[in-house]
Image (tube, rainbow, N blue to C red):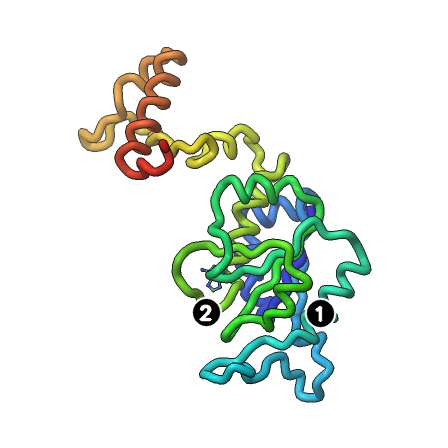
Amino acid sequence: MRIDILTLFPEMFQGPFSESIIKRAQEKGVAELQCHNIRDYSTNKHKKVDDYAFSGGAGMVMSIEPIAILIEKLKAERDYDEIIYVTPDGEQLNQSISNQLSLKGNIMILCGHYKGVDQRVRDHFITREISIGDYVLTGGELAAAVIVDSVIRLIPGAISDETSALTDSFQDNLLAPPVYTRPADYKGMKVPDILLSGDGKKIEAWKEQQAYERTKKRRPDLLK
Ligand code: ADE
């Protein structure tokens, strides 16, 4: 899978993309991540990428031209399955959207800043708009990094224990059950006896029950 990120702040991705699973997925060739600086595509002599809103009011709007030039350039190089704009007024990200995206070949993610991008970019180039939650971030970069992280870990080969992504919270609309590791007794804080019983069937039933109880208590909306 290839993901191209269109941003005014490519350096914001250096940290998240150079550690842990995302780093390893790239090294293994499971995912290719490319960041492009929108400013490099400005034809303005001062490399301006934004302007005042025609509707007035405070805040600048990202101009269509550099974004259009960059998107057209990338589209000429390969086909894209999805061109995503991250924005607080998009559909809210969930595990099902991440699963869908993990099956795609090439996707672009456009990050907005200031008051957002000129609406014509959204109307003419964007195929999907995604929000990571009902709160406003300074820009789309952190949202794009969240999407990339949630998608890449689902690609077969990205996580060494492939079954592990399948047992995550939300994969079957249930939260994950509690987990424990050694020691079995830490200063009197004990691991539930059943997990030490060695009875695989009973342990599985316990995990299912715990997942259900936790979901019922914390996220009853998921059970509907
Ligand atoms: N840009 C600013 N806030 C955002 C959010 N909550 N989700 C996606 N993109 C954003």
The reply to whether residue 4 is visible in this rendering is yes
Instruction: Please tell me which residue is depicted at 29% across the width and 38% down the height of the picture.
Output: 218
Q: From the viewer's perspective, is residue 145 above or below residue 180?
A: below
The reply to whether residue 179 is visible in this rendering is no
Disc 1 and disc 2 in contact, CB within 8 angstroms? no
- 17 vs 178, left or right, is right
- 165 vs 184, left or right, is right
Instruction: Please tell me which residue is depicted at 39% across the width and 12% down the height of the picture.
Output: 201
- Residue at the left extreme, as displayed: 188
Q: From the viewer's perspective, is residue 73 above or below residue 16?
A: below
The image position of residue 135, as x and y in percent, is 39, 61
The image position of residue 12, as x and y in percent, is 54, 65
Q: Which picture quadrant has residue 68?
A: bottom right
Residue marked by disc 1: 68
Q: Nearer the viewer, residue 12 or 176?
A: 176
Residue marked by disc 2: 138
Tell me which amino acid carries mark 1: Ala
Instruction: Please tell me which residue is depicted at 64% across the width and 69% down the height of the picture.
Output: 120
Tell me which amino acid carries mark 2: Thr
Rendered-image quadrant of the N terminus: top right
- Residue at the right extreme, as displayed: 76
Rendered-image quadrant of the C terminus: top left
Q: Residue 167 has which mark?
A: none
Which comes before the other along the chain, label 1 or label 2?
Answer: 1
- Badge 2 residue CB within 8 Å of ligand 1: yes
- 51 vs 136, left or right, is right
Q: In what element is the residue under mark 1?
A: helix
- Mark in front: 1 vs 2: 1
The image position of residue 31, as x and y in percent, is 66, 46
The image position of residue 145, as x and y in percent, is 53, 56
Q: In what element is the residue under mark 2?
A: loop
